[in-house]
Each structure stands twice: as C-alpha cells, then as structure tokens.
Image (cartoon, rainbow, N blue to C red):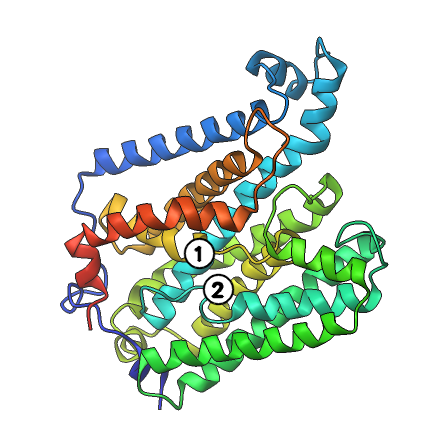
Amino acid sequence: MTLENTQVPYREQAASPIRPSVRPLSLTAAIFVGLVMLLMFAFVLSLAVGSVNIPVGQIATVLTGGTAENAAHANIVYKFRLPKALTAVMAGASLGVSGLLMQTMFRNPIAGPYVLGVSAGASLGVALVVLSVGTAGGTLLAGLGWTGDVALAGSAALGAGVTLGVVLLAARHVRSSTTLLILGLMFGYVTNAVVSMLLHFAVAERIQAYVNWTFGSFSAVTLTQLSIVGPVVAAGLLLAFALSKSLNALLLGERYARSLGVPLHRLRAGIVVSTALLAGVVTAFCGPIGFIGIAVPHLCRILLRTSDHRLLLPACVLVGGTVALVAAIIAEVPGSSVILPLNAVLAALGAPVVIWIVLGQRSLRDSFAT
C-alpha cells in the first residue's frame, strides 16, 4: 500500500494539482514586497527594543562599522541582539517551509514537524549528545565547543530524519491519515519517554538546562554557532525550492505525480532530508519551537490564495521569519528584564489569531476537507 492511501484529498484541487493565485500578478508582487518590508521592519525593531532601548540611528551606525555614542550599545547589538535576530529569521523560515513540506506530503492541515514527531526525534538526538558529553552547569551547550555544536546539529537532524522515515514506513501500512498522525504522535511519545529516562539519570544542572531549552529561545545561539546553523538552513531551503515543481504534482496524489514522470522515491527522500535538516538544526539550537510549522503555511495560503509551491515556499520564508521575530520581541518584554518562554508566547498570542483566520476562510477549510 502506498502513501497515496493515507492522503486527504484536496476538494478544490480535484481538477488541477495547482490552484493558481486568484490575485492579479501585480497584487501578488505587491504582497511579496510588503512581506519583505515587514520582515525588515521586524528585524530592525528586534535590534532596537529590549531591556535597553537603542535608537535606530545608533543601530545603523553600529551595523555600518561606525563608532556608537555609547560603547555598550555596540556590545549589546553585536553580541546579543544581532545573533538572536538572525537566528529568529532562519528558525522561522525553516519551520515554515518544513511545515509546508509536511502538509503537502501527508496532505493534512495539521501535519508538521511537531505533530508528526519530527521535533521529538530531533530532541532525542540533542539529549543523547548533551546528556552524555555535556558538562554540568552553564547553559545547555556549555563545554561542547565547535566540534560539539556540529555533533549536536548532526544528531538532531539524524533523529528527525529517522523519526520521519519511520512515519513514512508506517504510512505504507495504514489507510487513514488520522491513523498516521496518531502514529506520529505515538512515535513522539516513545522518543520523549527515552529522553525522560536519560534525564532521570542526569545531574540536576543538566536537567534544569534541558528543561529551560524545551521552552524555546533564539537568544542562546552565538555568532560562532550561526556559522553552523546558516549553511544547514541554506541547504535545507535550497533543496525544498528545488522540489517545488514535484511538490505541485504531488498535490493530486502519487498516481498523478508518477504519470508526470516524477520519481516519487527521490521526492520523498528529498522531503525527508530537507525537513530533517531544517527542523533538526532549529530544534538543536533553539529548542522544540511549536506553532510556526503548522500555522505559517496556512497564513501564506490565505494571503496568496494559491497552492502553488513556487509562491508558497518564498512566502513561508518571509512570513515564518517575521512571526519568529515578533514572538522573540514579545518574549523579551521590551522595557523590562523579564524574559518569557518563547513557546508560551507563540501559543498564547498566535494560536487564537490563526484559529480565527482559519475558521473565517471557507477556501482553506475546503482545501483540506475529507
């Protein structure tokens, strides 16, 4: 039995695998320009606000290599806020794109790295590295060094890929997409159980550090670690963009894609590798970030009114990065020293908005109707 039997048909796309944008080309271009400007605004705002507010003029001076009036401002921007902002953009883009890949592969509106156990698999890879070689005390990544960072990213990607591979194998033996999602959740519970056993035998400092890591944060990534995160994210995104035409063909199922000459085994492998890289590296360095992977693809579909991956993929990059930046700004609670858990902010502020948008969009509901 093939994966096709586990897919939820697109009612609106029964006649065509690609639902073209109903918006004029000029309006679509204007939307992308607006998304780019919104991302840039959120990026600058994330550098300017925090426990200490920095004037935008000073930020421009620092970034262009000039001398800031206050030396502390340059230190804050370079060592703390710039790495955090860059991490947020890459993490949001990665999770948005990986969520779109999962929803297309399984053709289910609630599919995503978190729901299908991919993030749980990445978390297991992180736990195996950190709890076995990490030193007690400090942050979660303390004492690992650059080589340890590479091992951390690799183990997270491997854990995510293995989990997704198991889900795909299970997809060959089940008829219902609901059953498949339940299996994904069960795989997540199994990996979480293994992590819990590892934590049981870890020292107290490691346990506290791991728990804090599960809250999610973009602030713990340094510029050195970005030299690892950046290339991995770029590789995952490039692979996803290379699959855009094949993903469009997959919208009507495996038979249709096969009739167009799409090599399905290579397509699945490409999706697995891309998702493992994107979700794995983000989970490794930022924690298991929820919400973005499921919500951003829906927001992009609503905004562009299309199912064409040639438009949705870049939109997910822009919207995902913007959502992550806004969440990071709110979590920092500008003007105070309070820092809120990132996942709590995403769930509390983002989920109700997305629920309201989804319930008000008939086209989105019909696109995933059974």
Which quadrant does the C terminus fall into?
bottom left
Point out which mark residue 114 bears: 2
- The answer to whether residue 252 is above or below residue 208 is below
Residue located 35% across and 53% down the image? 297
Q: Is residue 261 left or right of residue 87?
A: left
Q: Which residue is mark 1?
A: 293
- The answer to whether residue 297 is above or below residue 251 is above
Query: In the image, residue 302 lies at what x, y percent?
Result: 25, 48
Q: Is residue 364 left or right of residue 299?
A: left
Q: Amino acid at mark 1?
A: Gly
Task: For the residues labelled 2 and 1, say whether their Cβ atoms are less than 8 Å apart.
Answer: yes
Q: CA distance from mark 2 to mark 1?
A: 8 Å
Q: Callout 2: 10 Å neighbours few (<14), some, many (20+)? A: many
- Viewer-proximal residue among 59 and 214: 214
Point out which mark residue 24 bears: none
Q: Is residue 41 left or right of residue 17?
A: right
Residue located 39% across and 80% down the image? 180
Q: Callout 1: 10 Å neighbours few (<14), some, many (20+)? A: many
Query: In the image, residue 177 lies at what x, y percent?
Result: 32, 78
Residue 255 placement: quadrant: bottom left
